[in-house]
Image: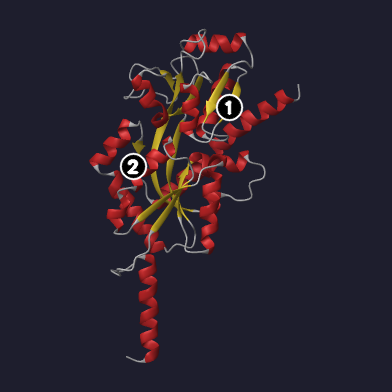
Amino acid sequence: MQRREFMTALTGATLACVFGLSGCQEKKNLTVVVPFAPGGGGDVLARIVLQPLSEEISRSVIILNRPGAGGNVGTRAVIRAAKGEGQFGYVTNGIMCVNKHLYKTQKFDPSAELLPVAAFTKMPLVLALNPKANSSIYDFQSLVAYARNYPKKLAFASSGVGTTSHIAGELFAQTLGLEINHIPHAGGAAAANEVLAGRIPFFIDVMPNVLPHAASGKLSALAVTSAERSSLLPAVPSLNELGLDDFNLYAWDGLAASRNIAPEFINAVHDAIGRILSRNDVRARLARLGAEPMLMSKEEFSQFIKSEGPRWESYVKSFTSRNASESTR
């Protein structure tokens, strides 16, 4: 073999090794940034899908929690990783569709700067109350009545500014014409802890953050945000049933990647996640949390994100304009 041919072959083999495109044993770790706190709903869901990934792609998968700013801190790190070896990032509707309209100083757009890899799940939210927090509030009707009788006295917790939990609370208040206070927290686990402690009466959050506490009796599930009741909470009405017409809100999540990762490797990861989401054990674990797998091609996931953008933008604009008008009174 001539020297030039040998160097060309060596370069090709090296690239294949780096990106995992051959049988090379020197495969690098796959790093996934989860931009939420450990133990919260997003972290739990991400790990259910990501933990089996290592065996599917025959390489180590490292999950890094980098919470903050509704997912922006970790997501920005994934975008910046494009200057190095690249990273994958767990993404949500909040990260891809909400934050850029909510944070005026945000100078990056995840939907434009990251590559959609695979959709994971969609899930409704649950309005959950700690009945010990306020003796005057013990069910849905008394919650609404208290808010009407005492404007701006009632508070709700959320998993952070701009998260689906926050938007759900704002839409709930706006739809019923209530004036309530938003108390953001660093993740769903922190918000749940405040409600469990009775310092804040209620929150509306994704099922993984609520179901364990509802099952233990520590919190009362008052309503779900999906158009229909959930099979996991068949006795709990939807907000539609309780008079909030056309209220249908759900969160979704998935995986995205820095733009410098090889397309062949992204395809391999996408295919592996499809196999994981088709496994009965994984689907059963997700179902117990109220999450429904969304099996999509990369192109379908990309189009889904684009179609969701206007809807979430309208949600943000509706409550930010209302809050702005109230602050000028």
Image coordinates for residue 2, horizontal then vertical, percent: 35, 92
Quarter the N terminus occupies: bottom left
* In the displayed structure image, the side of residue 277 where residue 302 appears, left or right: right
Q: Is residue 309 visible?
A: no
Q: CA distance from mark 2 to mark 1?
A: 29 Å
* In the displayed structure image, the side of residue 175 where residue 6 appears, left or right: left
Q: Are marks 2 and 1 in contact (CB under 8 Å)?
A: no
Check disc 1 and give the amino acid type: Ile
Coloration mode: secondary structure
Looking at the picture, does residue 311 appear above or below residue 18? Answer: above
Residue drawn 54% across the image and 63% down it: 83
Residue drawn 50% across the image and 20% down it: 202
Residue 110, numbered label: none
Mark 1 residue crowding within 10 angstroms, few (<14) / some (14–19) / many (20+): some
Q: Residue furthest bottom?
A: 2
* Residue 314 image-quadrant placement: top right
Residue drawn 39% across the image and 53% down it: 62
Q: Residue furthest left?
A: 280
Q: Which residue is mark 1?
A: 183
Residue drawn 49% across the image and 57% down it: 258
In front of the other: 157 or 82: 157
* In the displayed structure image, the side of residue 105 where residue 27 appears, left or right: left
In front of the other: 293 or 89: 89
Quarter the C terminus occupies: top right
Q: Is residue 109 visible?
A: yes
Check disc 2 and give the amino acid type: Ile
Q: Residue furthest right?
A: 328
Image coordinates for residue 285, horizontal then vertical, percent: 29, 36
* In the displayed structure image, the side of residue 90 where residue 23 appears, left or right: left
Q: Which residue is mark 2?
A: 48
Secondary structure at badge 2 equals: helix
